[in-house]
Image: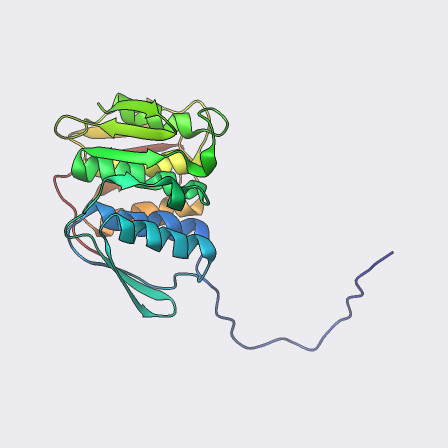
Amino acid sequence: MDKLIIKKSPPLNGEVVISGAKNAALPLLMTSLLTAQPCRYSNVPQLKDISTTLALLKDLGVGVEQQDTNTVLLHAAELSSDTASYELVRTMRASILVLGPLLARLGTANVSLPGGCAIGARPVNLHLEGLEKMGAVINVDEGYVRASVDGRLKGARIFMDIVSVGATENLMMAAALADGETVIENAAREPEIVDLANCLNSMGARISGAGTDKIRIHGVEALNGC
């Protein structure tokens, strides 16, 4: 059978440059939808899901400038569309993360179900139920989630039956611009949740508890760039 033989080596030294984490980068790029001001992201990994995300944001009207290999400048001064089409969404489930930011910023969002998955196959329903508690009206029609809200989303207490990183991220971004306080209970505690909270707070959001199972978000009227 195959085996690995590990022998003691001399003392190791030197430096290693670590690539940014995809799971952290994807929601961070989505935060650009929440503000009309430019956002600059560094140490962004060069991966297929990243390029798909940038293409999706560009399709929504976000200005995309690749400043160097791992740095991108995004500017969503004027979004030209509230629809994330199936052609771009189908290859990447994380694209559902545009739902909360679009709804919070524009008051309407139409997002194809990611990967063609049905409600309940993966916890996409947690995203929708949380947004509904915040006042959104949501319908699923011909493979699209169609969401709208009259005015601003409203702060709410949301308990998630299943721990979901994506739903926690989506609701955090939506709640950042909501009217009032949102409390997410049984929230995901992964490092990317903390990264997202730090990014949003740097933009002017008021989020506490990231990294625990209870996250509090005091909504603000507008966010700055980052």
* Residue 42 place in picture, x, y as percent: 34, 63
* Residue 152 place in picture, x, y as percent: 14, 30
Asked whether residue 159 is in view, the answer is: yes
Q: Residue at x 38, y 70 (%)?
A: 69
Q: Is residue 48 left or right of residue 199?
A: right
Q: Front-most of 3 and 125?
A: 125
Above or below 40: residue 137: above
On-image quarter of the C terminus:
bottom left
The image quadrant that residue 99 belongs to is: top left
Single out the residue that lies furthest toward the right: 1
The image quadrant that residue 148 belongs to is: top left
Asked whether residue 172 is in view, the answer is: no
* Residue 64 place in picture, x, y as percent: 27, 60
On-image quarter of the N terminus:
bottom right
Q: Is residue 225 left or right of residue 65?
A: left
Above or below 77: residue 94: above
Q: Residue at x 43, y 60 (%)?
A: 20
Q: Front-most of 152 and 78?
A: 78
